[in-house]
Image: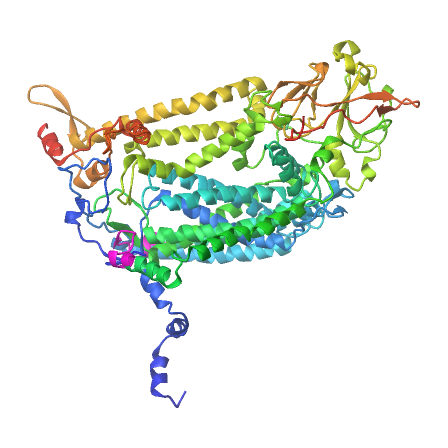
Amino acid sequence: MTATTAAETTAKKRSFTAAASNYIDERTSISGVVKEFGRKIFPDHWSFLLGEIALYSFIVILITGTFLTFFFQASQAEVIYHGSWVPLKGIQMSAAMNSTLNISFDIRGGLLVRQIHHWAALLFVASIGLHMLRIFFTGAFRKPRELNWVIGFTLFVLAMAEGFTGYSLPDDLLSGNGLRIIDGLIKGIPVVGTWISFLLFGGEFPGTAIVGRLYTLHILLLPALVVAFIALHLVFVVVHKHTQYAGPGRTQQNVSGFPILPVYAAKAGGFFFIVFGVVALMASLFTINPIWLYGPYDPSPVSAGTQPDWYIGFADGMLRLIPPHWEFVWLDRTWSWNIIVPVLILVVFLVVVAIYPFVEAWVTGDKREHHILDRPRNQATRTAIGAAGVTFYGTMWAAASSDLIATHFKLTMEGVIHTLQFTLILGPIVAYFITKRICIALQKKDRSVALHGYESGRIVKLPGGEFIEVHEQLDEYERWRLVSYDTYQPLMLRPNSRGKITFVNRLRAGMSRWLFEDRLEPITKGEIESGHGHH
Amino acid sequence: MAQDDNGGTEITPAASSAVDHRPGDAGTAVIVQDAVENPGFPPHRARITDKDPRKQRRAERTIYTLFYLSIVGSIWAIAAYIAFPIESGKISDLRISTLAIGLGMTLALLAIGFGAVHWAKALMVDKEGIDIRHPVQGTDETRERAVEIFQEADAESGFGRRTLIRNSLIGALVAFPLPAIVLFRGLGPMNEDPVKLLSHTMWKKGMRLTRDPSGTPIRASDVTLGSVFHVIPEGLNDKEDALDQKAKAAVLLMRLEPKDLHPSPDRKSWAYDGIVAYSKICTHVGCPVALYEQQTHHLLCPCHQSQFDITHEARVIFGPANRPLPQLPIEVDADGYLVAQSDFHEPVGPSFWERH
Ligand code: FES
């Protein structure tokens, strides 16, 4: 480089990175994005990682799933198996099953990728579920995040749909049986059931169309929706800025933590590799869905003790909990309440989950934004409702393994089912009251610690000969964690302008009383000062 | 989007932060007058790696060692791919290949992950920053302008004024997806009626009962007391739609002491010498009812534990099913083979709306 112009001189001084950045910015204006987001603050807490696990396992699913599509054939055309797995040689099966066996036995690393895909899918649904529990118990769904809760809920449902469609693709004995159950469920739906089943399966069950159709859903429509909803979900996280737990210095008007560049990027990026690595480890060590042991789908044989993937368990369990003979013919039509009732229960359960934020917002009438998370104990009734919901779900889920529970613990099948039917109704109620009591007890403890300090374990003898245990005072930072939270009063019922008390108001007041009747008064500055005086 | 003032600046103690500035009605929230004040951010504590240069160097060494290890893991995975063939078809070879490639990848991934996180935690500057939040809603000015724009657009287009145009457009928009819905009729075959299909199976008079899956016929004398046969209709395996037919026609055959059977009067002739045949398709949601308990003569469906009592025409004694399993009337032909007297007298399998 001998002849240089003025412009080139300045350019030459720049590093390659600078030149490349300049090239890109001149064509994309990306510097604005870096300026806006590069130093954006994210708060740190282990419970915030649950959503990240969900996101990262989805990326793992996309990567491994794409690999699998290169080999999988979504066809139910009958072929004779000629692959390496001897026990199935010469057996007639669908091209879908055949290609899945080939992925497992004839493509090096194919089984590994299949197992990573399956484990990541199980983790995906599980981490969404746990993430939702975290959001619920900390009140992160409150204004302005109600819509994001609904988006997240939608993702949970989509994830289950992705899981189920994927489970059905290999066309092995278990997946076929799962589809048979779905077919039976659909047929039980009043008015439209028979036709929906007929159209879905392209004729009679099992037909030759379903695997291809589910494949389209599984790799095209559903993933597109998941990607779109994840994008929306994350946009809202940016718009709202992340919530934070109460702590000294943290307010409703700030968010404290680490900037995206560099700390958060390093942690989150690193965490992606950890999630991927853990899933890869599980896939290397533990076989999942060994279709070669089940064989191709055949409507006749079934083996006892087989389980669906975990996230379908609650639906399958609910079916088992219906007592005999809930079905009759009326008006010349069959009313299958043994199907309608469990489906309705599941739908109502899911709808309640989806709309909970709006109900709570309506009851409290609180129109302020909430960016500081609740400690679950400080919202005793909400936490109790959550515990009741978890118990309800858990009972349905346990019912899906009723046969395993019975054989493993040497109980009768009938005994297990009757116990679970009982638990389904009483369990949530018991869980509700126990949780609420525990929360209030913890609140009391917090209150006394904040006012009087904690027991130091140090015993001293007073001049008078009397022994006391020394109470150590909290410093103001620790105390702030205990005393800064929102409480609500039960709503007073007042007549409206026309002197009437409407039903809606009565309902709201009733719910408000239910939610906020049992509560402790928040601690005031005066109390703390006089609290100190006692010692 | 709310924008950040103060983006990532260092923290200063927020003295007035205890006062709640949030706009909006607090509803039934308790507003405490004499509330405890937010003490502001605690002083920053230096990490051990900030104070001790030796610890810092050690952290550095750990991190780059992890990244190098990751490279080792990747190379290991590639080597394992080459070194462990699976073409023998032996499950042990497959296990080794999967494990070896998998562990290499695991090492490659986890080492990057732990290295990066450790870097962030131990070495990167750990001063926390704050962003200031603004209400999510736009500023008053923005919101006013947004309303104005809609009003202008409405005025300019006449959307609110020209109701006929607007309403006809809405009508058209509602109607235009309807053909797409109708197209979905084509998902199922045009000339078939699901109710008819569900109402009969391939069984017919004189058709032999054969073993599943071989298709060999069964003599009455083969069926010893207490035995169970999984049965398909003769010729099923040659059918084009064998699976569809099997999904309806599969049958369980068993022999009991004739005195143990309690058939209703019109079904007395449906059994042959204590041999009875019942549909294998559960009347709940259609799993194969494949588990037979010899002592109790109960059939158990493994899917949701419905139990059927064979001594009483397969009536439901437990579980979510409602209807008994349909019975296939059988007899013996001239050669001593078991044959069907007819098709089932009712639809088999799960209930459906039009069934009665
Ligand atoms: S399918 Fe047999 S009990 Fe549900």
Quarter of the picture containing the C terminus of chain A is top left
Q: Nearer the viewer, residue B193 or B3?
A: B193
Q: Is residue B187 left or right of residue A31?
A: right
Residue A186 in the figure: left or right of residue A25: right
Q: Which image quarter has ligand 1?
A: top right
Q: Quadrant of residue B342?
A: top right
Image check: B345 left or right of A56? right
Give the quarter of the image for residue A509.
Answer: top left
Q: Is residue A464 above or below residue A32?
A: above
Residue B82 placed where, x, y %? Answer: 63, 56
Image coords of residue A224 (percent x, y): 52, 53
Residue at the (28%, 44%) spot, across then down = A370
For the record, the magenta segment spans: B119-144
On the image, the x and y values in percent for residue B168 come to 49, 54
Spot the residue most to the bottom.
Answer: A3
Check residue B124 for magenta coloring: yes
Q: Residue furthest left?
A: A463
The residue positioned 84% from the left and 35% from the top of the image is: B235
Residue B97 visible in the current orientation: no
Residue at the far right in the pictured view: B334
Residue B262 visible from this viewpoint:
yes
Q: Nearer the viewer, residue A25 or A256?
A: A25
**Residue A258, horizontal then vertical, whole percent:** 30, 53
Please tell me whether residue B140 belongs to the stretch shown in magenta.
yes
Q: Nearer the viewer, residue A392 or A535?
A: A392
